[in-house]
Amino acid sequence: MTQPTLEQIASCIAGYDPNAMPVAQAQEFIARLVPRVQAVERLPIRSALGRVLAHDVVSPIDVPSHDNAAMDGYAMRGMDLADDGPTLLPVAGTSFAGQPVVSVVPPAFCARIMTGAVMPDGLDTVVPQEFTTLLPDGRISIPAGIVRTGDNRRLRGEDLARGEAALKAGRVLRPADLGLLASLGQAEVPVLRRLRVAFFSTGDELRSVGEPLDEGCVYDSNRYTLWGMLTRLGVELIDLGVVRDEPDALRAAFEQAAAAADAVITSGGVSVGEADHTKRIMAELGEVLFWRIAMRPGRPLAIGRIGDGAGGRGAILFGLPGNPVAVMVTFYAFVRDALLAMAGANAEPLPVMQAISAGALRKKPGRTEYQRGTLRPTADGRWQVEITGSQGSGILRSMSQANGLVVLHHGQGNVAAGDLVDVLPFDGLV
Ligand code: AMP
Ligand code: MG
């Protein structure tokens, strides 16, 4: 498959302007740029958690395979229920879960039945045990109005019918899906191969954890936040460390990354005033655009393809800004969805919450702002969000203290205390 050039993609984007690009336009561009992995592997169910399903999984059986009881009690025919007053029925046997079914229950008889046990032929209703009384003559008494025909019976195939697509290709497998696959009796699952992502930090001022912190230097934190976000995303990681601002070192790092990975993520060295070599080497090794995005934090972004790795198609490059908060915000705004698409995932949109802003927020229309906030329930059962102190793009603490990102949209202006704002919560169910 031939890839469109970046120029061709740009020509499909209405009002494309690399120097003032709205977030939504950048997202659209990136969505058109990224290819999807193709290779498939088969894994045991438990190894497939978080992986992307490669093909539809069609149920080979009805689940459940028989009509069965949803409660412990007595199975009977709905037509035997008395119109008025209690119903009295003799008991013809007992049906236990996993045991051969009680074959014949004559008309106007019932059978004792346990949850999950197969419904004897012709019986369609289960009366829960607690509503019944066992009479001295061995019959049970069912008070009037307790059940209707069909109550407390699970139908064959009601969970999954044979031949039905139980899970669709592109599904990122969650705990319930593993259970569903097991319920079909499938030991193995076809998943797409994991996406390989290489990343490194650029900047002469960066020192790695464990090294002494020289005068005027900072510890490289971006590789750790990136490691965390990428690990959560379930990709395969190639950590290439800190790369000095030297053309040969940068060239070698980009080449190694592009040869080994589907995507390359760097931080630093892409802002306009950069004196270093990062941008030049990126442009030299591939087809790369340098954008200024109408967002805060995270204005500069390099995007494109470098090298001829990944089967001669080149690796997708995300050159993120250097500031630690900008790295995380641009990752969430652009890289996350792009990597999921590359991994073949049919990702659902992230849930956005509306919360009451605890304070007034200054916001200029014409750019998207991502502020860091703490979501808390209010006494009356709603959600409030409060900004986590100074929002400088170098202040990683603002991110660490937050439990969500307040998204102030492109066209939005100032927010008054008490207004509703959109918040992307960081955490969900496991
Ligand atoms: P740059 O985008 O290279 O101009 O970097 C912007 C700011 O982010 C500078 O203050 C850098 O020192 C800082 N920075 C860049 N990379 C990192 C990193 N990996 N860890 C921590 N801070 C960084
Ligand atoms: Mg720099």
Image: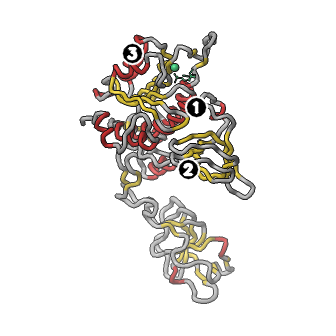
CA gap, disc 2 to disc 1? 20 Å
Q: Residue at x 59, y 74 (%)?
A: 127
Which callout, 2 or 1, points at the residue further toward the start of the chain? 1
Q: How is the image coloured?
A: secondary structure
Q: Position of residue 318 (x, y in %)?
A: 43, 30
Residue 148: give x, y in percent of width and height.
55, 79
| Circle 1 crowding by C-alpha within 10 Å: few under 14, some 14–19, many from 20 | many
Name the residue type under label 2.
Val
Of residue 125 and residue 256, the one placed in the foreground of this image is: 256
Mark 1, secondary structure of its residue: helix
Q: Amino acid at mark 1?
A: Val
Count residues near mark 2 (Cα–Cα under 10 Å), then give few for <14, some for 14-19, many for 20+: some
- Please identify the quadrant where the C terminus is shown: top right
Label 1: which residue? 325
How many marks can you see?
A: 3
User: Does 171 sit above or below residue 397?
Assistant: below
What residue did someone put label 2 on? Answer: 352
Q: Quadrant of the N terminus?
A: top left
Q: Residue furthest left?
A: 2
Instruction: Tell us which disc is closer to us: 2 or 1.
Output: 1
Q: Which residue is mark 3?
A: 251
Residue 348 position, x and y percent, is: 46, 49
Residue drawn at point x = 62 percent, y = 10 percent: 214
Q: Is residue 340 visible?
A: no
| Residue 328 locus on image (x, y percent) | 54, 33
